[in-house]
Image (cartoon, grey):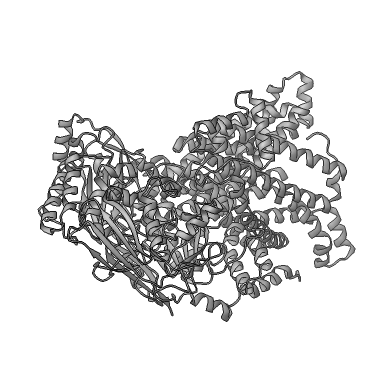
Amino acid sequence: MAHFTLTPPYYLALLLLVLTGCDSNEALYLSKQSIIYCSEGAPESFNPQTVTSGTTIDATANQLYNRLIEFDPADNSIIPGIAKSWHVTRDRKMVTFYLHKDIQFHQTSYFTPTRLLNADDIVFSFNRMLDESHQYHAVSGAKYPFFQNAQFAELIESIEKINDHTVRFRLSHSDSSFLANMGSNSAVILSKEYADQLVARDAMADIDMLPIGTGPFKFKQYSSGAFIRYEPHTDYWRGKPQLKQLVFDISPRDTSRLIKLLAGECDIIAYPIAHEKIKQHPNLILESVTSFNVGYFGFNTSKPPFNDPLVRKALSYAINKQAILETVYTGQAEIANGLIPNSSWAYDSSITSQEYSIAKAQKLLTEAGYSEGFTMDLWAMPVQRAYNPNAITMAKLIQADLQKVGIKVEIVSDYEWSTFLRKVSEGEHQSVLLGWSADHPDPDNFFSTLLSCGAIATGSNRTFWCNAKFDQLIQSALQTDNINIRKAYYLKALKLINDEVPLIPIAHSKRYQARAKNINGKLLRSIGGIDFNGVTKN
Amino acid sequence: MARDKVYQEEDFPTPLMQLWHSFKQPPVVMIGFCCFIFLIVLALLANIITPYSPVENHLEYVLLPPAWSNDGNVSFLLGTDNLGRDMLSRLMQGTSLTFGLSIIVVMASLAIGVIIGSLSALTTGIKSSVLNHFLDVILSIPSLLLAIIIVAILGPGLENTLWAIIMVLIPQFVHITRNAVKEEFAKDYVLASRLDGASSIRILRYSVFPNIIEKLISQATLAQSAAILDIAALGFLGLGAPLPMPEWGAMLANGIDMFYIAPWTVYLPGLAILFSVIATNLVGEGMRHALKARKEN
Amino acid sequence: MLIFTLRRLSLFFFTMLLLTILSFSLSFLFPGEQLINLTGQLYASPEYLEALAHEYHQQEGILSQYFSYLTHLFHGDMGYSMTSQLPITSEIFNRLPATIELTCVALLVAMFFGIPVGFVAAIYHRKVPDNFILAIAMIGYSIPVFWLGMLAILVFSIQLGWLPSAGQISLLFEIKHVTGLQLVDILLSDSEYKWQAFQDASRHLILPVIVVALAPATIFMRLARSAMLEVLDTHYIKAAKAKGLTFSQIIYRHGMRNAVIKVIRDVGLQFANLVTIAMVTEVIFSWPGIGRWLIESIYQRDYTAIQGGLIVLSTFIFIVHIIIDFVYAALNPLAREPHHGT
């Protein structure tokens, strides 16, 4: 018989075994000091001032920066941040912030601070957004959607530096959501010294792409669309973080994140799927937090047929919300009757959503002149968000629902997340599935960001609905601090939305996260981005 | 005494019968052939015999496992997917999409490729060299990339996918036809026909084709398994049949998001693809084996 | 040998010509404005577009436009990606090494495992090992690669936990990008975790390589088997048997060398197929190579990227093909003679 041996393959196999053998102690040590977080998308920029996208805020806001005011994770009440205290005058038109004296900025390969944080930095960070003649205003496109929606430029008359650690804001009128806005994720404090250096180097765009802040982590490396690497800020004023390395592994596909968690390649993952399996797994923990959010089915009211409120109202009778709740949210959410979730004080149980009735829908359609039905497009988000875990499935359900009243729906979803957002802000859609997670506990954040006239220009009002009466109602609600009066205004606003139906609110859902058992620390917050300060691994 | 046959006749089977005879000898090949026929029948009848409509959502029965598991339900034999659609019906309808369309694709590219190939075999010299290089270039572009580019040009959709795959498969047939025809042309019987005064077309039709048809058929079966895999790959990447059509590759892509909680949504379409490709390959193997046996006799 | 080289070079030039013509015509065939498809400048102002139009000779005939396109290519300017607005050349050359790593290692693995197994099958022709190997081979090239990838991840990453499921290397290691070939870069870097990083990168490489190499390995198996069968049938083998050489002597001294030569010829042709499979594998394993980038560009309708990727990928395949042709010619003196006509 033949007596040869296949020696080359055997040697190869042996070599392979040696090469890939067991981990040595040093590698284990490196892994124990680092956390890899699988995120659902790439950040659009490294400065939360310029975006409202939750993905960017998660990646940057609490890691790289601090704000004057912050929210207590336990009850969302206002607590000091960079400002250790503040004083509001009786007419509420002047707010003075007193700053901490020991806050240091990051030191990286591209910047070394020569001084501590002082009032100049506060003045710079806000004037950049509010003053159109500021040299940094137009850098990165002059878009500050959060503040433009809250109309900060009209609200703030001036910002003065009283001394190195005191800043005074003068307001043009009293605004009960001012302090809450100052605590939002977009109100971060940048370094004026760094900004000046960039001007000298003629590299002003770097302020948003190579960030410098005061937060617990500093920027090390970003590989576009692939990963972000952060190092701990050794001189962080609240105490150096215990991690040696924090890495954001950008994995847009739900299944990839799940696989990486199961295979141990990620310690924590965002927006997990397969909740039951994770709960049953001995080494994994599923966490959730009730978020301030709403998922909605919005219409582009500037394009036919959705410029006709009758058509919009007709569709609101044709959607089976219960089925969506069970299939898409797997029961982990509540049906949204209005824009506001019931954990907010502005919620009112008198607002109910339209019942599910095909007959009523058809009647209204015929009234509007569309008894034959029509064709429309429905843009569904390609990524998972807290307010909508699977927009594509939701779109398919809506497609099947609307088919029963003779409407043909084409689902559009094939874009990368930031491209998708951009196109929708430009109004390419007829209808879209989106949502909103609040930046701060004040209900104005829902109303003005999503449906005010001003928000059309900043791109966050994707319904292009502009109603003067509505704008007036929410403006009036900001003039007073009296919660009951504000509540009355907001109730009228909610009723208006219910009648005109620029969007159909679908559900308020929880935000989930899955992590390995050996990770400690509270990462999720009900308002705002995730926070890695205080997260450790054993 | 009435006797049916007085003389013992020698029964010479026709070439086709000879082919069939040596084809059905190995039992594996016969099994493959039966599966192949089964798939063809399924593809033709799918619309009629599916228990449920493949695109209907049964929202009360979302993500049901197959009937043999504890939570399964006999009325949904192979379970349901994330929108409650019956897997069995979708798989059956998918046969006509993935498998049935692959046959159409192969026949089309066979026809076009043979025509181009034989015409180009008649040319000689520089024209022939250029054509050869051109073919080499096309063959060195990855087939998936070429299909993807064609889909990008034409836009997504089922017909455009088909055109893309037809165009990708044509060069193989051109190559084979060209070489085969050139080989035959060098043989003596062609020379004899020419001396008789036959034109090239006539020679092609009556003398050469019958001799190269076996090579073409064997290449066609190879091409068909490639076509099934390509249609499924394009469907998997989302560039093929639009949702909610139950093409097997698209079903697999749909199931990946739930493969941990509902692994049958990934296993079943994959097994379907594997099954049909193996059946096609077995038929192809049997064909090649039979052709070789015939050549040796 | 000279004529052989010259013929190969002329083939190469001709191929490049055809490829560039193909890519150039794509800018007309893709939907959208031709100039934007060519350059990728989605957000350019009208004046800038006019300047570009002048640069690309838009006002002159097609031939002149084509030559200006070629000039830009020679200077390394393939336009800008429509999605990321980065130069295509930098995007491609950031990712090409990863694909080179994956495909070349997979090719070697497929050859090292496929060819010897094919020889074994030929030696035990028509007996149990032969049929067994043929059956495995058939299943091997019938499996859809995307399904195989998912199964491999399910079994090896999740259930057994032996191998990682995505990426080239664990993100914990910071390796400076020098050549782009991960293994080479690790050896060149001065990180304190060099050895662990090398082990980690190898572990990341194993699963994708196996998935990519499976189908080509089975094809090589069949090719090697039929090549060896042909060789074993030849007269000189019979003569060697008659001379009294032992079986293993025959195989090692005469059989293998001649059979391998026959197989190498077809290896080059299979490389395009292998790259196709690698493209889908890159998507499944999130391997940061050109294949995954091209497929994403299709989703994003990034036409400039598709054009650039097509040229580079096809050139790469063709270069490998030509290298293998040279290897074949080195091993087989007969091939070096010029062939007349084709």
B58 on left or right of B232: left
C272 shown above or below C206: above
Decide which of C85, A435 is in the foreground and name it. Answer: C85
- Relative image position of residue A260 (x, y in whole percent): 46, 66
B107 on left or right of C71: left
Decide which of B80, A294 is in the foreground and name it. Answer: A294
Label count reads 0
Quadrant assignment, res A78? bottom left
Quadrant assignment, res A440? bottom left
- Relative image position of residue A374 (x, y in whole percent): 27, 32
- Relative image position of residue A522 (x, y in whole percent): 34, 72
- Relative image position of residue B118 (x, y in whole percent): 67, 29
C159 on left or right of A126: right
Regarding residue B193, the answer to whether it shows in the image is yes
Decide which of C244, A48 is in the foreground and name it. Answer: A48
Locate the C terminus of chain C and report the quarter of the image it occupies.
top right
Q: Residue furthest right?
A: C243
Decide which of C267, C200 is in the foreground and name it. Answer: C200
